[in-house]
Image (cartoon, rainbow, N blue to C red):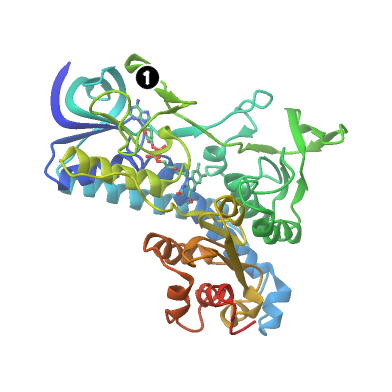
Amino acid sequence: MNELSCKVLIIGGGPGGYVCAIKAGQLGLDAILVEAERIGGTCLNVGCIPSKALIHAAETFHGQTDEAALAAMGIAAAAPRLDYAKTVAWKDGIVSRLTTGVGGLLKKAGVRSLRGRAALVDGKTAVVAADTGQSRIRCEHLVIATGSEPATLPALSFGGDVISSTEALALRAPPRTLAVIGAGYIGLELGMAFAKLGVEVTVVEALGRVLPLYDAELTAPVARRLGDLGVKLYLNARAEGFAQGELRLTRGDGAELKLKADKVLVAVGRRPRTQGLESLDLAMSGPFLRIDERCATSMRNVWAIGDVTGEPMLAHRASAQGEMVAEIICGKKRAFDHVAIPAVTFTDPEVVSVGLSPEAARAKGEIRVAMFPFRASGRALTLQRDDGFVRVVARADNHVVLGVQAVGAGVSELSAAFALALEMGARLEDVAATIHAHPTLSEAFNEAAHAGLGHALHI
Ligand code: FAD
């Protein structure tokens, strides 16, 4: 057994763990990163990046088939052909470029990386079964960044044609028919992408609305687009089982239904990876590791970051926590006290939510809510996408912006401006007084702020 020691041992090389390791290295801390599978974790290998690559390829393909939209611009295109093996190779190339890059950054920061599964002996010791043999690693600080994995449904366990997002992103050919269980962001992002590639897609959702974490006004344009793409939607319906290519459903009214599906994508959420951590007997918060505002667990010098610590399970939250924990270990005074963590859904149209929704803000006091629709945006018209809007939520008394939501093609790129406004404590007057470049979708943010002050210019 190899005996190793370090100041900081990080378990898990996803966006939480690898960012923590790079930061620790940059701060001069002696760090070891252990990753059981592939550096980059869920996000780079089977999550954010490959899904966005597939979404972009699907959008590009579908754009060539939208004859009406092309004809309006005077374009007649030949029917496009899809070589899906090349699409997958292109997507895999992006993943490999990014993961190789992260490997290089770790090296540059002086981090020792070990490939293997870590089993924790106690809060200062882990045993890693690596290809090169077993290692025992002793550390002063332990950072748990083991992430999450797809949640299962008892009636639809993974295997065969019942797949998770991981297998959906690795298919060698698109199925003819696909049933997606769960109309959350992962199910809808992938379902819409496959629909654009010509797959017959059905979405089954137990609740009464798609993207149920957002409000109805925000998700209505996505529901409309699902219809335009020919996606069949069963709301208030439960998937009961799958056999011989048939998915059994029970609808809200009790009616039973059978649907043909070549593949069933179960996208009903993700659960934390806490296996192997039992020996530490850490305090839990439901299924997640309980942490405080410094990401400290219930054990001294044992820290936890990312999906294993709960919602929102997002890559940028994991990374921000990872960076902070490295700084705390280095002796800096830090706390995770961000005003907002932006959430983006890369559906068509995209959805952004930063800070408080109107409902959540109203529960805290008097508010103003104002929106600007993209149908009044010159830039949206030039992009042939005038569906959606930007909505601003502000305090009624002093106009401090509490939340910003948007739905529309390409609005993911507006999330940074929204988050910055919230972090800087901007008021409606600040956003309205900021000159936004013309013609851009971002003008809708400025216009919504004007509307909130009672004097929108372009509506
Ligand atoms: P992970 O990325 O899950 O990494 C944990 C790592 O720990 C894994 O590599 C695992 O192999 C390793 N590990 C676990 N146990 C051990 C052990 N005992 N020993 C050694 N290694 C171990 N988020 C966004 O912000 N934007 C998006 O657009 C987005 N899209 C997504 C799309 C899909 C299809 C999916 C599935 C997820 C998406 N996410 C997105 C979520 C995002 O991927 C996660 O929030 C993020 O990866 C969490 O990072 P993490 O570091 O906490 O964990």
Q: Please provide percent x and percent y for residue 24.
A: 19, 42
Q: Please provide percent x and percent y for residue 397.
A: 51, 65
- Is any part of residue 408 visible from this angle? no
Is 226 left, or right, of 282 in this rendering?
right
The residue at which mark 1 appears reads as 276
Q: Please provide percent x and percent y for residue 285.
A: 45, 27
**Residue situated in front as seen by the camera: 225 or 339:** 339
Q: In the displayed structure, would residue 457 be above or below residue 253?
A: below
Task: Count how many numbered circles sit on residues in the image.
Answer: 1
Is 378 left, or right, of 245 in this rendering?
left
Q: Quadrant of the C terminus?
A: bottom right
Q: Quadrant of the N terminus?
A: top left
Q: Quadrant of ligand 1?
A: top left
Is 415 left, or right, of 386 in this rendering?
left
Is 88 left, or right, of 280 in this rendering?
right
Q: Please provide percent x and percent y for residue 218.
A: 64, 58
Q: Please name the residue shown 30% across and 42% down the image.
A: 322
Q: Amino acid at mark 1?
A: Gly
**Residue situated in front as seen by the camera: 434 or 161:** 434
Whether disc 1's CB lies below 8 Å from ligand 1 is answered: yes
Q: In the displayed structure, would residue 416 be above or below residue 162?
A: below
**Residue situated in front as seen by the camera: 377 or 297:** 297
Dot 1 alpha-carbon crowd within 10 angstroms: few under 14, some 14 to 19, many 20 or more = few
- When asked about the image quadrant of residue 328, the answer is top left
Q: Please name the residue shown 35% across and 48% down the image.
A: 337
Q: Please name the residue shown 75% across and 33% down the image.
A: 238
- Is any part of residue 347 visible from this angle? yes
Tag 1 secondary structure? loop
Q: In the displayed structure, would residue 367 be above or below residue 117?
A: below
